Image (tube, rainbow, N blue to C red):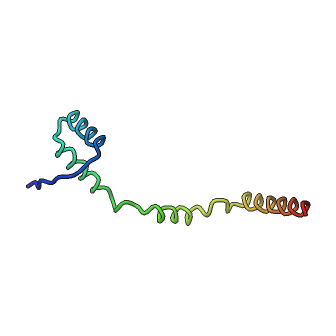
């Protein structure tokens, strides 16, 4: 059973779908149904970018948490403080 539906696509996307359907010898409906199935078969819902970033940070730490970066920040702050004191 198939349900007919009308969708709106940007012109460039419509032309690309049409061209790919012809190249694969499929109807537009067939191509769009196949694409929708492939999308829906992917595991899970689209990932929340914030959650992904938080997981990466939890696994690898904040950028700049390594000892060399901490030491660099300390030296930089000291240099900035000294240069500000000289100006006064």
Q: Determine the image quadrant of residue 28.
A: top left
Q: Is residue 18 left or right of residue 86?
A: left
Residue at image point 74% right, 57% down: 68
Q: Position of residue 32 (x, y in %)?
A: 22, 47
Q: Is 18 placed above or below 76 here?
A: above
Q: Which of 6 and 46 is in front in this view?
A: 6
Q: Nearer the viewer, residue 84 or 46?
A: 84
Q: In this view, does 80 lie to the left or right of 46?
A: right
Q: Position of residue 14 (x, y in %)?
A: 25, 42
Q: Is 13 placed above or below 72 here?
A: above
Q: Which of 62 and 12 is in front in this view?
A: 12
Residue at image point 29% right, 43% down: 13
Residue at the top extreme, as displayed: 23
Q: How many labels does the image show?
A: 0
Q: Where is residue 20 in the image (x, y as percent from the top left)?
A: 25, 37
Q: Is 62 placed above or below 37 here?
A: below
Residue at the left extreme, as displayed: 1
Q: Which of 79 and 63 is in front in this view?
A: 79
Residue at image point 17% right, 46% down: 29
Q: Where the C terminus falls, by quadrant?
A: bottom right
Q: Where the N terminus falls, by quadrant?
A: bottom left
Q: Is residue 80 left or right of residue 11?
A: right
Residue at image point 56% right, 63% down: 57
Q: In this view, does 72 lie to the left or right of 17?
A: right
């Amino acid at each position: 059973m198939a349900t007919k539906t009308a969708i709106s696509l940007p012109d460039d996307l419509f032309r690309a779908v049409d061209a790919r359907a012809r190249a694969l010898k499929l109807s537009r409906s067939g191509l769009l149904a196949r694409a929708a199935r492939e999308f829906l078969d992917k595991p899970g819902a689209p990932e929340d970018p914030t959650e992904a970033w938080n997981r990466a940070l939890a696994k690898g730490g904040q950028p700049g948490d390594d000892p060399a970066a901490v030491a660099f920040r300390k030296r930089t702050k000291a240099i900035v403080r000294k240069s500000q004191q000289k100006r006064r």
